[in-house]
Image (cartoon, helix red, strand yellow):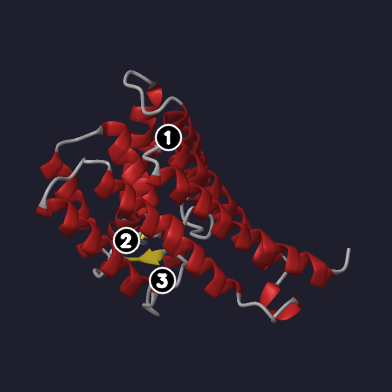
Amino acid sequence: MDIRFKALSVHLLTATGAVLSMFAMLAAVEGNWRVMFLWLVVALIVDGVDGPLARRYDTPNNFPIYDGVLMDLIVDYLTYVFIPAYALFKSGMLTGWTGWLAIIAICYGSVIYFADTRMKTKDKSFSGFPACWNMVVLVLFAVAPSQWTILAVVVLLTVSMFLRLKFVHPTRTKRWRYITLPVSLAWVIFAGWAAWVNFAEGTWAHWGLVATSLYLCFAGIAQQIIPDRHSAA
C-alpha cells in the first residue's frame, strides 16, 4: 500500500473522532450518560491509536494537505472538554452557581491551554493538567463524591493547567512507560466497564478507575521530584 494512502488513512481515522463526539453529544442531550461515556471511551481509544500511526507514517510529509495536529485538537476539545463539561452541568451533580462556575472554568481554561505553545515538555509529557476532562468527569460519575468535592477537583485541576506540573503522556513519555502504558490501558478497560454497567455500585471498576487515575495524575509530578538516573548518567 502506498505510504501516502496510509498517511491519508490516519487523517481519516482522526476525523472519525468528530462523528463519535456527535454520537456522544446526542446521548448526552437525552441524559443517557452510560451511552455518552461509551462513545467517549471509543473516541479516547481512537485518539490513543492515531498519534502513533501518524508518527509511523509521517503524515506531515506524506500527506501534508491536512493538518493532523489541528484536526486532533478540534476533536479533543469536543471529546475531552465540551461534552464532559455539558454532562457535568446537566447531570445535577453540581447545583446552582457551582455548575456554572465549573463549566466556565473547564471550557475557558481548556481552550487557553490547548492554544499554549508550552503544553508539551522536552520528554513529550504535558506541562500542566492536559484538560482530560472526559477522564475526570467519568471518574466523578463513577465515584459520585459530594458537590463540594467535585467543585474542588474542577478548580484545582483548572489551576494546575497553568502550573509547571508534569503529567505523563500514556505513550510518548519514555520514563516509566513500562508502567504508564499498562496503567493507561487498564484505565480504558475500567472506564468502559463502569460505563457499560451504568456506574453500578459495588463493581471493581470503581476502585480500578480511582487507582489508575491517581497514578496518571501524579506520576509526572513524581518524576519531577525523583531524579532520573539514566539522564544523569
| Quadrant that contains the N terminus | bottom right
Q: Pointer 1: what residue?
A: 34
- Could you tell whether 38 is left or right of 12 in the image? left
Q: Do the numbered discs 1 and 2 sit on residues whose CB atoms are within 8 Å?
A: no
Q: Say what amino acid the circle numbered 3 marks.
A: Thr
Q: Earlier in the sequence, mark 3 or mark 2?
A: 3
Q: How packed is label 2: few (under 14 Cα within 10 Å), some, or many (20 or more)?
A: many
Q: How packed is label 1: few (under 14 Cα within 10 Å), some, or many (20 or more)?
A: many
Residue furthest to the right in view is 1
Q: Is residue 121 above or below residue 37?
A: below
- Helix, strand or loop at mark 2: loop
- Residue 232: % across, % down: 41, 66
Which residue does the image show at 62% across and 57% down from the upper left?
16
Q: Pointer 2: what residue?
A: 129
- Residue 130: % across, % down: 37, 62
Which residue does the image show at 53% across and 55% down from the upper left?
171
- Residue 105: % across, % down: 22, 63
Q: Earlier in the sequence, mark 3 or mark 1?
A: 1
Q: Do the numbered discs 3 and 2 sit on residues whose CB atoms are within 8 Å?
A: no
Q: In this view, does 41 lie above or below 202?
A: below
Residue 121, which numbered label?
3
Q: How packed is label 3: few (under 14 Cα within 10 Å), some, or many (20 or more)?
A: some
- Could you tell whether 201 is left or right of 26 in the image? left
Q: Earlier in the sequence, mark 1 or mark 2?
A: 1
Q: In which quarter of the image is residue 101?
A: bottom left
What is the distance, in whole Å, between disc 3 and disc 2 at their CAs?
Answer: 12 Å
- Residue 60: % across, % down: 67, 78
Q: Quadrant of residue 149?
A: top left
Q: Is residue 179 above or below residue 14?
A: above
What is the distance, in whole Å, between disc 3 and disc 1 at their CAs?
Answer: 35 Å
Q: Say what amino acid the circle numbered 2 marks.
A: Phe
